[in-house]
């Protein structure tokens, strides 16, 4: 297996997280009371797919490392999906799903900010450009998840009163 740099490893992680995010948004969309957030969840899933596509295209240019990076991405995806399954195992309500997404999206944002910093420090313009784009996408996702979570929380407490 090729020796991966810390930046290569982070690229593998963000690729795997983007892949897992597509599964997570689809899972949350099936939960009780999630139907009204269908458009937001579909957008997040499409943007995660676009993040995957752009990251994979960047990785295509890393000769001698593509296979190792993609293998590590598969591991990351598997770990993230396993976390989702564990967290949402017996949950049916959308609020629980959005709580999970809040953690997942924050993790993705942090990973992309790390890639952004590493790329800036190393002077890697193409990687930095991708990271700049992805950071903005992740910030939007966090805001969407936050808004949905708070709306569901208000409703949950109102119906319990």
Image (cartoon, helix red, strand yellow):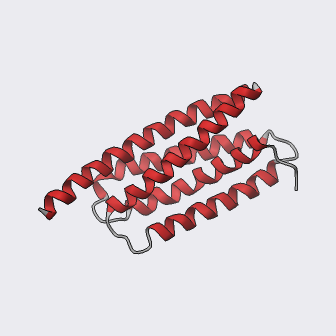
Residue 124 visible? The answer is no
Image location of residue 123, percent across then percent down:
75, 24
Residue lying at 21% horizontally and 52% vertically, measured from the top left: 154
Image location of residue 30, percent across then percent down:
37, 64
The one nearer the camera, 48 or 98, is 98
Residue lying at 39% horizontally and 60% vertically, measured from the top left: 97
Residue 148 falls left or right of residue 130: left
Residue 113 visible? The answer is yes
Residue 88 falls left or right of residue 107: left
- Please identify the quarter of the rendering in which residue 57 is found: top right
The one nearer the camera, 27 or 151, is 151
Relative vertical location of residue 97 with respect to residue 61 in this rendering, above or below: below
The one nearer the camera, 158 or 62, is 158
Image location of residue 89, percent across then percent down:
44, 73
As drawn, which residue projects farthest toward the bottom? Answer: 90
Q: Quadrant of the C terminus?
A: bottom left
Q: Quadrant of the N terminus?
A: bottom right
Relative vertical location of residue 60 with respect to residue 32 in this rendering, above or below: above
Residue 57 falls left or right of residue 88: right
Residue lying at 56% horizontally and 57% vertically, measured from the top left: 20
Relative vertical location of residue 92 with respect to residue 64 in this rendering, above or below: below
């Amino acid at each position: 297996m090729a020796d991966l740099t810390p930046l290569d490893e982070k690229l593998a992680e963000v690729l795997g997280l983007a892949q897992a995010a597509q599964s997570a948004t689809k899972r949350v969309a099936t939960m009780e009371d999630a139907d009204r957030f269908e458009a937001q969840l579909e957008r997040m899933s499409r943007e995660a797919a676009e993040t995957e596509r752009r990251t994979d295209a960047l990785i295509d240019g890393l000769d001698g490392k593509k296979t190792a990076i993609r293998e590590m991405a598969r591991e990351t995806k598997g770990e993230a999906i396993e976390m989702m399954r564990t967290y949402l195992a017996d949950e049916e309500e959308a609020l629980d799903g959005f709580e999970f997404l809040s953690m997942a999206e924050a993790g993705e944002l942090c990973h992309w900010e790390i890639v952004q910093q590493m790329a800036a420090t190393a002077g890697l313009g193409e990687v930095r450009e991708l990271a700049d784009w992805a950071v903005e996408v992740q910030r939007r996702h966090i805001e969407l998840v936050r808004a949905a979570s708070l709306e569901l929380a208000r409703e949950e407490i109102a119906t319990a009163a």
